[in-house]
Image (cartoon, grey):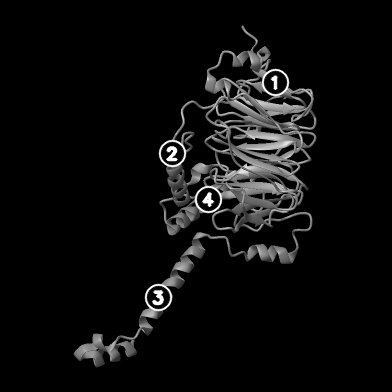
Amino acid sequence: MERTYRIKQKDLQEHLDISSADKIFDLDLPDFGPYSMDYTRNGKYLLLGGRKGHLATMDWRNGNLTCEFHVRETIRDVAWLHNESMFAVAQKKYAYIYDHTGAEVHCLQKHVEPTALGFLPYHFLLASTGNSGKVVYQDVTEGSVAGEHRTGYGECHVLKVNPYNAVVNLGHSNGIVTMWAPKQAQPLAKILCHQGPVQAMAIDRTGTYMATSGQDGRLKVWDIRNFKQLHEYKTTRPAHSLDISQQGLLAAGYGANVTIWKDALANKVKKPYMQRTVGGTSLSDVMFVPYDDVLGYGTDKGVSSIVIPGSGEPNFDAYVANPFQTKKQRQESEIKSLLDKLAPDTIQLDPNFIGRLDPRTAVQRQREAVARQQQEYTENKATGQYLDNTVRNRTRGRNSTAKRYKRKRQGNIMDLKKLQEMEALEKRMRDNENKKRKVPEAEKGALGKFYEQKRKNN
């Protein structure tokens, strides 16, 4: 019966162990905010990017600073790549890749004026969108562009990667969320989520639920398996940042408040789980730490970290992400992940299509299709229904003589008669080739002249 949203971090810190209490901290960086942040897949390292050009990477549990530098340029978003050795930064004009020492590795000139970044760890693809109105996929292992598509909805500032099927979701200014794959020029799906611009988006790790927030002040939860809205919440101000933890907790940052809902995806809850108010500033980014009960958020004055009990996954798979990974284990996992790299063609809404093979040959499929066509023709002949291979009367200017003749001469319609003609033609061609085939001298033998004479007579 206790109202958990009234519990403050100061009261909670008194009842925690020393290591857990140290996870509650504030980094005061008032000169370079607001800050964007990102954690590695194992939750060990933290990447900070200030809007005014400040970049820093650190082992946030131990407080060890890995690198820190200033790019003297606007930073809009940051993202780790496959591990803590490399990270990407969306700067004013292009996207850049840096290593763990802060040295510039690549300048990605295809990513023009990027505003949001996302990384696909199993495909080694860096996805970005920005003011150019495009979604660009960059293969960080080969350096080539795996896909570049124009969205058709203008500039975009919201990008999230679905961890279940690696589909990139974009939120546009007209309230539509589009889903993209690198090898398809058109979006896989479109959902009208809000009446105004989409401000933030979050997807759970199972790929079942998607949370979106819009300028209309609504926070909606969607079931993206069937593209239906489940329920919605109201916030005092539009939420500019959303995140879903590994255990299904939903965090929303709006204004100077961050609110966390528990079990808010499958069911609609009436009260929040926890709440935090930051005085004198506004939040810019919120993110749960993987495999830990911690929530980090960036503000105009720096970065803070608070404890959210029950948010992280307690049991980790060392083959996927190891929070206690050593240097040698990191090197081995990097090589194995490169060997197991997936092709961009495998990105679809349903990733389980991989391995579904049709054991039938092409001839068998063709014969079965013709048999079905003949059966449908027999069944529908009495009723007068049209089949796919009949010339239909079209309306509204589509029934001209030339167009009817063109439809009648279509070559992509396969019926039983045409199939028999093709088989007969192939048989005649094979017979002619056998007749024209010359027999080598070694095959003629002593009776070679009689063989030649018989072949000429035939």
Of callouts 3 and 2, the N-terminal one: 2
What residue appears at the point 68 percent right and 15 percent down from the top-left corner?
271
Total labels: the figure holds 4
What residue appears at the point 67 percent right and 56 percent down from the top-left corner?
392
Location of residue 440 with respect to 131 vertically, above or below: below
Q: Amino acid at mark 2?
A: Tyr
**Foreground disc of the pair 2, 1:** 1
Q: Which mark is residue 430?
A: 3
Question: Where does residue 201 sit, x and y in percent of width and height?
Answer: 68, 35
Q: Which mark is residue 378?
A: 4
Question: Callout 2: helix, strand or loop?
Answer: loop
Residue position for label 1: 276
Of callouts 2 and 1, the N-terminal one: 1
Q: Which mark is residue 319?
A: 2
Question: Where does residue 144 sit, x and y in percent of width and height?
Answer: 59, 59
**Foreground disc of the pair 2, 4:** 2
Q: Amino acid at mark 4?
A: Thr
**Foreground disc of the pair 4, 1:** 1
Q: Amino acid at mark 3?
A: Arg
Tell which of 44 and 58 is nearer to you. 58
Label 3 neighbour load within 10 Å: few <14, some 14-19, many 20+: few
Question: Alpha-carbon distance for marks 3 and 1?
Answer: 80 Å
Question: Alpha-carbon distance for marks 3 and 2?
Answer: 56 Å
Of callouts 2 and 4, the N-terminal one: 2
Question: Where does residue 12 sit, x and y in percent of width and height?
Answer: 61, 15
Of callouts 4 and 1, the N-terminal one: 1
Question: Callout 3: helix, strand or loop?
Answer: helix
Regarding residue 191, the answer to whether it shows in the image is yes
Of callouts 3 and 1, the N-terminal one: 1
What residue appears at the point 43 percent right and 48 percent down from the top-left corner?
336
Q: Amino acid at mark 1?
A: Arg
Question: Alpha-carbon distance for marks 2 and 4?
Answer: 57 Å
